[in-house]
Amino acid sequence: MGLLDGKVALVFGVANKNSIAWGIVKRLHEQGATVAISYAGEALKKRVLPLAESLGIDFVEECDVTSDEALDNVFAKVADRFGKIDILVHSVAFANREDLGGRFVDVSREGFKLALDISAYSLIAMARRAEPLMPEGGSIMSLSYFAAEKVMPKYNVMAIAKSALEAITR
């Protein structure tokens, strides 16, 4: 009997076998949770599906977290299939390469908005949709990085996005 028997976990951000999200999926599964996986973009499908199949996970959905329609779709499918969510994992982050390296003052406005939308705001959008599926409460987890608090070379706009994510999580 596992610690999470009877619990449903929805994990966003599985990219490959080395992604932190995949490590979380494996631990949730080991502890008895029913796990649903979401990944970003068709290009990741060929990596994510075999991982899910290796654990017998059959709920695997693509989701563009910048799209309300895509988020609505994933959460509606989770509601139809499982009726609830006990655990929501936000392991999603992205910034354009040109907005990570180089000089901080050269970060573009569009790159800034994109990084904050995907890496931080998406947690708000997910939590809004998860709340009605957590009538008895639940857990929402997000992943950050040291650069949210300390200067890290080549992390530029992502440091701001992770700081925002930490503030949202609090």
Image (spheres, rainbow, N blue to C red):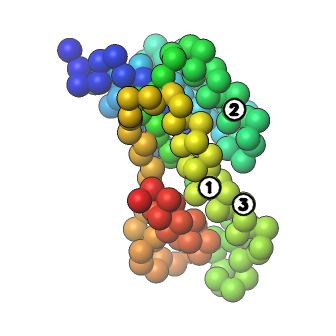
Q: Quadrant of the N terminus?
A: top left
Determine which of the numbered discs, if any, sits on residue 121 in the image.
1
Q: Can residue 143 be seen here?
A: yes
State the residue at coordinates (75%, 43%). Answer: 67
Q: Nearer the viewer, residue 105 or 126?
A: 126
Q: Is residue 106 above or below residue 88?
A: below
Other-residue count near label 1 (Cα within 10 Å), few / some / many at <14 / 14–19 / ≥20: some
State the residue at coordinates (69%, 86%). Answer: 105
- Dot 1 or dot 3: first in sequence order is 3
Q: Nearer the viewer, residue 82 or 154?
A: 82
Which residue has dot 2 on it? 72
Determine which of the numbered discs, if any, sits on residue 158 in the image.
none
Query: Is label 2 in a helix, a strand or a loop?
Result: helix
Residue type at tag 1: Tyr
Spatial distance from mark 1 to mark 2, Cα to Cα?
A: 15 Å
Please name which of the two marks, 3 or 2, marks the residue nearer to the observer. Answer: 2
Query: Is label 3 in a helix, a strand or a loop?
Result: helix
- Dot 3 or dot 2: first in sequence order is 2
State the residue at coordinates (58%, 42%). Answer: 128
